[in-house]
Structure formats: C-alpha cells, structure tokens
Image (cartoon, rainbow, N blue to C red):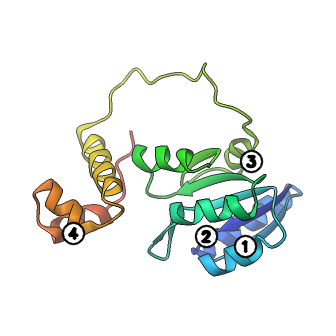
Amino acid sequence: MDILLIDDDLVFASVLVRSLSRREHRVRHAANVAAALGETASPPEAIILDLNLAGESGLRLLPQLLERAPLARILVLTGYASIATAVEAVKLGAVNYLAKPAAVGDIIAALGVQAANPEHAVSATPMSLKRLSWEHLQRVLAEHDGNVSATARALNMHRRTLQRMLTKRPVRD
C-alpha cells in the first residue's frame, strides 16, 4: 500500500515510517501542510493524518487532501483524542480515527476498514467525570472553530485557565 504520513513529530514519524516499511508498505512523510499538499501530486492509497500539525488543525487539511486524492483512505491519528474531533474527522471524510500511541497493526487494520461495524461492542462503564469534562471542553472548542477566547467566553471561564486545561492530555478511560 502507498501511504502518506502527515505528522510534525519527526521522531514519531521516523519510527512509524520504518515500522510500516518493514511490513512492505511504501511510505512518504510530510511534516507540514505545504509538504503534504505537495506529496498528493501523486495520490497515495492511504493517508495517516496527525490532528495537531505544529498548532494547525489537521481537520482543516482533510478536505484538501480528499480533493487531491479522492480515493485515498484517511486515518486521523492524534495524541489529543476526543469524541468531538472524532465525529468531525469522520464527517469530513476520514475512514477511521485512532488515539496515539497506536500499534502498527492497529493502524494498518484501521486503514483496511471498509465500512462501519454495527456489531461493535458498546462500553458498559460510563466515562469518568474528568473524561466527560475533557470531552465537553473539546466539543465547545470545536463549536467555536478552535477559538480559545470564544470558547472561554462560552464556558464563562478565564481564557488562561482554559488554555492550561487544554494543554493537559486527556484522561484515559
């Protein structure tokens, strides 16, 4: 499979490129938006897109990638996973969404998914209060197009407090 990896973390990208290459995939890497769009001159079969590209949202790049490579299967891979960004990624055309760290086998499996699985098990345990809070912040942030000041006003909180909360990694369930 011809894969384009778009990730600004050079250490992570080099490890993933090496791991995918060992599994006999052709992998190209782009570290920023301009390089990613340049790599689509020869459309890949699959694209692994980081959600946070040096402060820019990978979600904004997703429609441009699909326009240039309409048959490409796009997997959004992020260290800041939330329900809001997962839903938005799928709405924009991603075939799957994974949280980092993800095993290479899981990444390949996610790229190979052809359709949604209605048999997928629903968790019996509810999310923790901290996780619900994180999800709510992400949803409101998405509603305000990533604008931290507007989100802070909507949540009736100080902007710097919100910024501190957003720099923390989400709680795992």
110 sits left or right of 23 in the view: left
Residue farthest along the front direction in this orientation:
67
Q: CA distance from mark 2 to mark 1?
A: 8 Å
| Disc nearer the start of the sequence (4/1) | 1
**Which residue is under mark 4?**
149
**Is there any visible trace of residue 118 in the rendered image?**
yes
**Which residue is under mark 2?**
7
Q: How many marks?
A: 4
Asked if the residues shown at circle 2 and circle 1 are in contact, with their CB atoms under 8 angstroms apart, the answer is yes
**Which residue is under mark 3?**
108
Q: Quadrant of residue 21?
A: bottom right
Q: Quadrant of residue 155?
A: bottom left
Q: Residues within 10 Å of mark 2 (few under 14, many from 20)?
A: many
* Residue type at the position of mark 3: Ile
Asked if the residues shown at circle 2 and circle 3 are in contact, with their CB atoms under 8 angstroms apart, the answer is no
Say what secondary structure mark 2 lies in.
loop
| Disc nearer the start of the sequence (2/3) | 2
* Residue type at the position of mark 4: Ser
Quadrant occupied by the N terminus = bottom right
Query: Is 91 rendered above or below residue 76?
Result: above
Q: CA distance from mark 1 to mark 3?
A: 16 Å
Say what secondary structure mark 4 lies in.
helix
At 84% across and 70% down in the image, what residue appears? 42
* Residue type at the position of mark 1: His
Query: Is 78 rendered above or below residue 120?
Result: below
| Disc nearer the start of the sequence (2/1) | 2
Asked if the residues shown at circle 1 and circle 3 are in contact, with their CB atoms under 8 angstroms apart, the answer is no
Q: CA distance from mark 2 to mark 4?
A: 27 Å
**Which residue is under mark 1?**
29
Q: CA distance from mark 4 to mark 1?
A: 33 Å
